[in-house]
Image: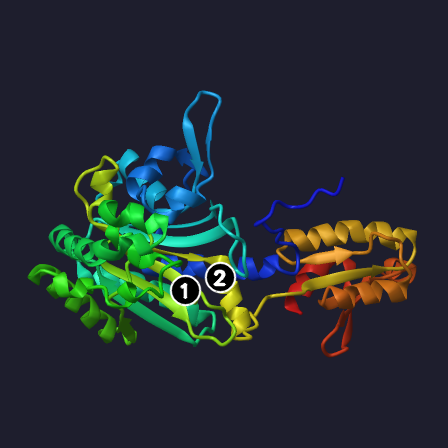
Amino acid sequence: MNIKAPRGTQDIVPGQVEKWQFIEEKIRDLCRMYQYKEIRTPIFEQTELFLRSVGDTTDIVQKEMYTFADRGGRSITLRPEGTAPTVRSFIENKMYANINQPVKLYYLEPMFRYERPQAGRYRQFVQFGVEALGSADPAIDAEVISLAMSLYKDLGLKKLKVVINSLGDKESRQAYRNALIDHFKPQIHEFCSDCQNRLEKNPLRILDCKKDRDHQLMKSAPAIIDYLNEESRKYFEKVQQHLQALNIPIEVDPNLVRGLDYYTHTAFEIMSDAEGFGANSTLCGGGRYNGLVEEIGGPEIPGIGFALSIERLLAALEAEMIELPLNEGIDCFFVSLGDEAKDYTVRLVHTLRQAGYSAERDYLDRKVKAQFKAADRLQAKYVAILGEDELKRNIINVKNMATGDQKELALDSFVEQFKRL
């Protein structure tokens, strides 16, 4: 029986995982600068959490969730996105009572969606996301967008585009909702069954439909920006003003609604314009969700966040042919000649590792030439050569592989002398 990884999943093996580690380290450093603290939530949650937050008319809930009954008969769902679990934890752990406000959190965790696998998209994928809870200041909307842009730019991506829109407050959304129903209703029978079901429940989702995106009514649909009340309009203008001050170019797209029901006011996507990246150019998406905390059972607290896929980020780096500056290679490889020297290197390798250096030795009883080849493959900066003669003289020869220089170091003070190298 040929057992393989499930469809839509992947093994991240040595040679690839180093890129992940580099990006993860960059994310953690960036979040420290922006003062976002890491949160880790369970991989599975009660299904009701996603029904109430993401929305029962969304593709995620209707088609993509991994949902099952546990042995106690409870409906459980593998986490399809990170905002709802983060907000649930925010409420359950009473973070709204923290003295430091707003509460700024980030996560870097696997998500699960049953969708058609394609380049850069998997059924198990890793999302980096941030959530800022407790502030209704437009400046934090700009901060969240700038954090995502900083990550992409720090990694070398250049062909980026920020697209934003406003979904307005509850009053503005209701006015827009009514306008969309009036617009689509006469010809809704020409749309897919999903759109027909969404007409009365959530007509904004129709604008997000991929099947009917070329329908003439899609192109002539009213824009939500025309239905914003004065307060929502001013908020959106302030967000744009802050982004301009941060030198982040933006495009306003009146049809950008995002795929989740909890968004209010600012909605945004960061896209790749790189040639060959693919038809779906979205790298990152997010927005404000001022009613979500209350919807899940918490107090009336505003929030904003984004999420991006690490897999999509890696695909964008590949499209722009960007090589990450990975710290590959090891500090020292020990080449030994003779049984006594081979045994002695066991202790030397351990001692050097304890001092904070990466070190390796031969474990296959190879000839000297083969050991040097192994050192080359591991990109060793130094090779330490120990034979029976060196043992008798209490020294070890250390070769700098970049320059070819070779020095004799005393065995009883090897680590201290190696540090000076």
Residue at the farthest bottom position:
403
Query: Hey, what amino acid is under mark 1?
Result: Thr
Secondary structure under tag 1 reads: strand
Residue 191 location in percent, x, y? 33, 55
Q: Which of 22 and 418 is in front in this view?
A: 22
User: Considering only order in the chain, which callout, 2 or 1, is on the residue closer to the N terminus?
Assistant: 1
* Residue at the spot of label 2: 312
Residue 203 higher or lower than 368, as above or below: above
Residue 368 location in percent, x, y? 89, 64
Label 2 environment density (alpha carbons within 10 Å; few <14, some 14–19, many ≥20): many
* 130 to the left or right of 276: left
Query: Hey, what amino acid is under mark 2?
Result: Arg
Residue 62 location in percent, x, y? 39, 43
Q: Which of 412 and 320 is in front in this view?
A: 320
Q: State the quadrant of the N terminus.
A: top right
Residue 140 higher or lower than 317, as above or below: above
